[in-house]
Image (cartoon, rainbow, N blue to C red):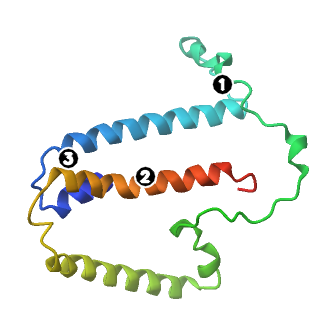
Amino acid sequence: GITACTYHLFYNSIPLLVPLQAFLTCVGNTTAAYAAYRIAVSNGWRADNEMLQFLNSNAVEGTNEDKSASSVEKKESESLIGFEDLGDALANDTDYTFLIKLFGGCAVASYAIKYGELLFDFPFDASLGLGILVILIPSLLNAFKWYKRSLDPTF
């Protein structure tokens, strides 16, 4: 998604971003399918069809954690926080106030993006290096956040 947005940010003038988006989509879909398979196997799923018996290998065995070791009381994680952690802030909203906030936020962000880019020259001067940085920096920050969360035993 971020590659497509970057392509449009530069007014479709960096054609290399189109095959890059296709490649990243393929990698993302493949890793998501593998993660779904690992979750299914860790929950006891087994392939019934004879043609799929190779999926029943023991390669993913051992991913189950010992359930008795999880008797430690869980407390709130203090890992890096992102937009997905806004649940507590929006918990007291009704459906209508949430929709009003959502619409208002989208309208303000759309206006800022549409007219705010006119304050800068870089969208009009396409640069492959800058385009790659626009893709890599948020992606690496997101990966670092999830890496830090993976180290937190309370998460």
Q: Badge 2 local density, few (<14 within 10 Å), some, or many (20+)?
A: few
Q: Are marks 2 and 1 in contact (CB under 8 Å)?
A: no
Q: Give the residue pinned by disc 1.
A: 60
According to the picture, the residue beneath numbered tag 3 turns out to be: 17
Q: Nearer the viewer, mark 1 or mark 3?
A: 3
> Of the residues shown, which amino acid type is indicated by label 2?
Leu
Residue 1: image tag = none
Asked if residue 71 is positioned above or below residue 118 in the image, the reply reads above
**Amino acid type of disc 1?**
Val
* Image quadrant assignment for residue 89: bottom right
Which residue is tagged 2? 140
Residue at the location (21% across, 39% down)?
Answer: 19
Label 1: few (<14), some (14–19) or many (≥20) C-alpha neighbours in 10 Å: some
The amino acid type, in three-letter code, at marker 3 is Leu
Q: Is residue 22 above or below residue 119?
A: above
Residue 71's spot in the image, x, y percent?
Answer: 90, 50
Identify the image quadrant of the C terminus: bottom right
Does dot 1 land on a helix, a strand or a loop? Answer: helix
Within-10-Å neighbours for mark 3: few <14, some 14–19, many 20+: many
Q: Position of residue 64 (x, y in %)?
A: 76, 33
Q: Are marks 1 and 3 in contact (CB under 8 Å)?
A: no
In the image, taking residue 45 as reference, residue 98 lies left or right, namely left
Local secondary structure at mark 3: helix
The residue under the point 44% across, 80% down is: 102
Q: Position of residue 124 (x, y in %)?
A: 9, 66
Rendered view: 121 above or below 17: below
Q: CA distance from mark 2 to mark 1?
A: 28 Å
**Mark 2 or mark 3, earlier in chain:** 3
Real-space CA distance between mark 2 and mark 3, rounded to the nearest whole angstrom: 18 Å
